[in-house]
Amino acid sequence: MKHTPKGTHAWLPYLPLSIPQGRSPFEIAQSELREGLKALGISKEAKIEVLGTGDEYELSDTGDLQVRGGPTGVLYGSYHLLSLLKRGAELPKGVVRPFYPLRMLNHWDNMDGEIERGYAGRSLFFRGNKVSFDRERIHRYARMLASVGINAVSPGNVNVKPPMDFLITGKYLPEIAKLADILRLYGIRLLLTVEFNLPLAAGLATADPLDENVMRFWRERAEETYRHIPDFIGFLVKADSEHRAGPFSYGRTHPEGANMLAQALKPYGGKLFWRCFVYNHNQDWRDPETDRPCAAFMHYAPLDGQFDDNVILQIKNGPLDFQVREPVSPLLFAMPGTKKALELQLAQEYTGQQVDLFYQAKQWQDVFSLLSADRVQFITAVSNLGDDPNWTGHDLAQANLFAYGRTAWYGRSDPEQYALEWAQLAFPCAGKEVADILLHSPDTYEKYVSPLGLGFMVNPNSHYGPSPDGYEYSSWGTYHRADREKVGVDRSARGTGLTEQYPGEIRAMYDDPAICPDKLLLFFHRLPYGHVMRDGRTLIQRIYDDHFEGAHEAKELALRWKTLKGLIPEDTFERVLTRFDRQEKNAREWCDVINSFFFRFSGIPDAKGRKIGPSKPAAHP
Ligand code: GCV
């Protein structure tokens, strides 16, 4: 039987699906360039030269093509050269080098093969509680990541579930080392997630970070891990967060816990990534004082200077939890004496779950427009990949991974450019049209799901579909506080004080409803339905209008996709069309449920006289 390779070409249609020949990034670059040029029908000679030590490269075309750069730089340069030739674009002048030294991808895969918040199939690395992967597929995965400069990967969930807690032991390390061997060929290094309580599971009496036996235990784990994977980057930890153990379990501080792990890694040059997603998930919803988005700053900002220099605090882009629209996390501006990593989420947990289209680079623009990229030293993103043949479930969601790679490489967000590059590579006959669809998608989605900064009106657990009170009377700290008069949470200086965590000008902007951007108005303020917006509409009218517009635009996106028939490979076209059909129905559902919710509370009818549910629902096929 003919072997059909799994894992499509993604945005690299000119590279063969077979494994490239080579035992180093340099040799892989040679092989990729040779095959790529052949497929592109370019007969020029290509010379690769290793100069320097790192990720940087320089491209030139003086009759012959030349790629010069560091040992990994030549690989990045080769992929970049091929993509430029494919798109007929000009070569960059001068040396190209990445902004961030580590451009990471965090998978949330469990060892049974499930992926937490995974919307594209099952794990690429684990199955049946074992390390288990398809070598060819991992080559294609690594190539895809390297082609956009991603150079670090953590395969396991930050919610470490057994037996993953034992991944850093002799039982699993030999297999993990085989994975590292493939990734290394593409300049990619491994991080592993660890469970703070592992010493207990391993039979010690405690996991107290100040206990001598516990310290020795972690030193041994680090030593054994580096013995198997000499270029290992380090550990990633979620502690004292959402049921996970951590230093608090032992009456210790986060610097005490993090520094202990960091010291175990130090002799090998290892790093400890420590997530700051720490808040009280057992909150009383009646308590108006405790405000979840304030939590991380309140906990960590006073700890500046107390973490060792190989500890990196990993901070989500917003202060709440990857909602459709959030302000930049105030913690990212704080702690000048502490290393930080920005964490983005490619997995579309709250942004359509890879059924609805949501091009995320526009969301990241919010971060980079306020936060200069050098406020953080590292960058990471939660992966949107799985073993679906097209990697991301929704084919167009590949654009998010691509744009993330570019964002991490350049340290800036340029959604238009990255969308166009991706679309021209993936769909050469319809590049501009597809890029345009991508660029419209986040505004459309935001309008029908969550305009004006309202969040969490989703079904509990799945986080998909409208449920306005889904998290309203729960312990998770995720409230919109809608009543008959008003909606939103007052997080200004007069309210929970979140705005006071921001530096000067940003604080002033968020604190005053008159200048707070509309898109965040109800995130920061509690306002009456009759509040007159800057555009003259009332708040309630704006809520109605946005939902109606969003549902209408979702339909338009589907129609625009339909015009591309014949320009997109047939199977991809059909697959995406199915998703657009589902999106259209979802959008209608969101519009009807949320508008009905606000109509019932406020009693204010739509000024434009449109019917706000209950009306006859569209027939579901
Ligand atoms: C991995 C949210 C998600 C969880 C996730 C958590 C985190 O709460 O719903 O699935 O856990 O964020 O980022 O740790």
Image: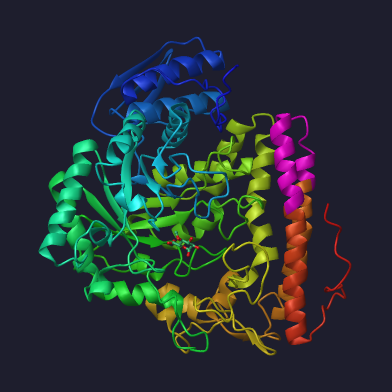
How far across and how far down the image is residue 452, in percent?
A: 62, 72
* Residue at far front of view: 203
Q: Nearer the viewer, residue 223 or 572?
A: 223
Asked whether, in this view, residue 156 is left or right of residue 263, the answer is right
Q: Is residue 580 magenta?
A: yes
How far across and how far down the image is residue 237, in percent?
A: 32, 58
Q: Nearer the viewer, residue 593 or 621?
A: 621
Using the image, determine if residue 530 lies above or below residue 254. Answer: below
Asked whether, in this view, residue 363 is left or right of residue 21, the answer is right
Q: Residue at x 48, y 50 (%)?
A: 413
How far across and how far down the image is residue 382, in percent?
A: 45, 52
Q: Quadrant of the N terminus?
A: top right
Q: Residue at x 27, y 59 (%)?
A: 201
* Residue 577 in sight from this viewpoint: yes
Q: What's the magenta region?
A: 559-582
Using the image, determine if residue 409 lies above or below residue 196. Answer: above
- How many badges with numbers are in the image? 0
How was this image coloured? rainbow
Asked whether, in this view, residue 73 is left or right of residue 119, the answer is left
Q: Residue at x 56, y 36 (%)?
A: 421
How far across and how far down the image is residue 28, in percent?
A: 37, 22
- Magenta segment's dominant SS is helix
Residue 143's quadrant in the figure?
Answer: top left
